[in-house]
Amino acid sequence: MTSGRRDSWNVLVIGGGHAGLEAAWAAAKSARVALLIGNPATVGRMPCNPAVGGPGKSQLVFEIQALGGLMGRLADDTAIHTRVLNASKGPAVQSLRVQNERDAYAQRAQDVILGHSEIDILRGEAADLESDGRGGWWVITTDGRRFHARSVVIAAGTFMRAVTWYGRQSRPEGRQGEPPARFLSAPLARAGHTLKRYKTGTPPRVRADSVRFSDLLEIPADPHPRGFTGRPGPRASESPTWQTHTTPTTHALIQANLHESPMYAGDIEGLGPRYCPSIEDKVVRFAHHDRHLLFVEPDGIQTSEVYLQGFSSSLPPHLQDGLVRTLPGFEQAVIQRYAYAVEYDVVESTELTLNMESRRLPGVFTAGQINGTSGYEEAAAQGLVAGVAAARRAEGLEEVTFPRESSYLGVLLDELVFKGSQEPYRMMTSRVEHRLLVRQDNADERLTPYAVQLGLVGEQQAAAVTAKYARVAAATRQLETQRAQGQTGDAWLRRPEFSLEDVEALGIQVDGLTAEEREALQIRVKYAGYIERTERQLRAEAHAQGLSLEGVDYSRVAALSNEARETLARLQPQTVAQAGRISGVRHADISALLVHLKEQRVSRET
């Protein structure tokens, strides 16, 4: 770690969470980097659930891995439970989820980042930003030190003017026991950025030896673990997770004490996540449900704590004790760390470029929850983009972008910049129009060649990806040229009830493939028709983006949602591309517009 050897860098990153880690790691591939943090021991912490991946999120992590990022590697190294979610569904929505050993993940991140020869570690709290008048920036700390950089990445997470809530009592904190970033909001607001208040929360941590696990539903890990790097960690199937649920007693206790919730009492002004609500919010919004499922997940192999996923709360500690003990298996539970809510400042993401650069402060980039997102994976993805862009700007190189059509990462950036968020944004597979083309299994094929151009991965990794898909292509030809019972191997494999193993049982040979390559082969052959149709649709949509909407009467467009009909009539976009970037206008609405335009053209021609 450093200190006073330098006072100027190409890129200076503020914050050591998941966004800051990826930003520093990516920028250091080609630039001199400084990482400004308050306490190195907090680098890489997982303050919420110690898990990586899940629907929509694992696709981001596979893309980060393909682009030379860190998160997939750290997750695999410290995995204790892995499962492929939606395994019975199609490949477009299958998602890997990896439960991690919390302390080991942070330690592994610290080993990688704090020992990096091209990343200098600076300890302190950022207080202000000041232009150097030449396109660069001074970062000024609370103790008066001044650090210069050509580009700055702010990855402040949930810390900007942050306040934690335990019932109706609050204190200035960025997360439990850590001070907030008190001053960073001011230079952003002074430059004209719109700041909003968001909130999120965590569940209580319960002593593992106080839980009766025999009363819980055990969820085993997959017997053949998967990994983001292709090399699952040594303990990837070592621990199960469990499931419990709320009871009518839980719900009655919450309803009787809503006045002690800072959210329902009106103390919290920040907007919370719709897709990961507090337990109070679930009970109120879904009053017709008599139970809500909860997942009990370990913090590690030797841990003394378990994490109650789905039970985040801002109710006071004395109520949390009683609430947790209403859950099956938790009748004698002892809480080691109480749940809390955290309220913090976020930047209006529509004021950024697609590279996460401020339109108000050129050369200053923001990444992670500061941009209104939720989750480690979304933060890490933004950090990688901001780190690459900041380094390229510092070196005078042209900007690069990640298209929406070819990556989850592109969808994330596009939606943040063009649609913004009214609540903490969470990536989901449903947000991705062409998800059959941008699956988790082909992230390396899609993005590793791009990563080579950007200098993010070496020739060895690129060559391995090229060789992998060459073997898959050769195996595809093998299936096409071998026959059994009068049909080719690929024809057999396209049958819904047939797997690759079934085809091989007919005597058709496929040689020398790894498990990953076998999966890639099966998807390519079995879904070939769907993939080809989606590619044709994508090409047609690319042509259609420039079509004019002048004179369209949206009240006469069949199949438009009511929200889209009202929004389009009010904003009157000039082209289909502009319509697609309006919040509330979904892909199905764009399809309806295209059908309408085609019908109009046919009507005029006849």
Image (cartoon, rainbow, N blue to C red):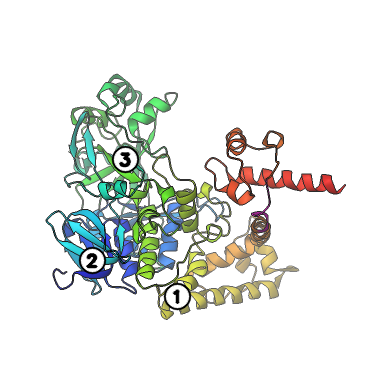
Classified by dominant secondary structure, the portion drawn in magenta counts as loop
The numbered mark, 1 or 2, whose residue comes first in the sequence reads 2
Looking at the picture, which amino acid does disc 2 mark? His
Q: Secondary structure at mark 1?
A: helix
The residue under the point 23% across, 62% down is: 138
Q: Which mark is residue 263?
A: none
Q: Which mark is residue 148?
A: 2
| Alpha carbons under labels 1 and 2: distance apart | 29 Å
Judge whether residue 232 is colored magenta. Answer: no
User: Residue 501 versus residue 177: which sits nearer the camera?
Assistant: 177
Q: Residues within 10 Å of mark 2 (few under 14, many from 20)?
A: many
| Alpha carbons under labels 1 and 3: distance apart | 37 Å
Image quadrant where residue 503 sits: bottom right
Q: Which mark is residue 452?
A: 1
Q: Give the answer, above or below, for where 49 lies relative to 482.
A: above
Residue bounds of the magenta highlight: 543-549
Q: State the residue lying farthest toward the front.
A: 133
The numbered mark, 3 or 2, whose residue comes first in the sequence reads 2
User: Residue 131 versus residue 322: which sits nearer the camera?
Assistant: 131
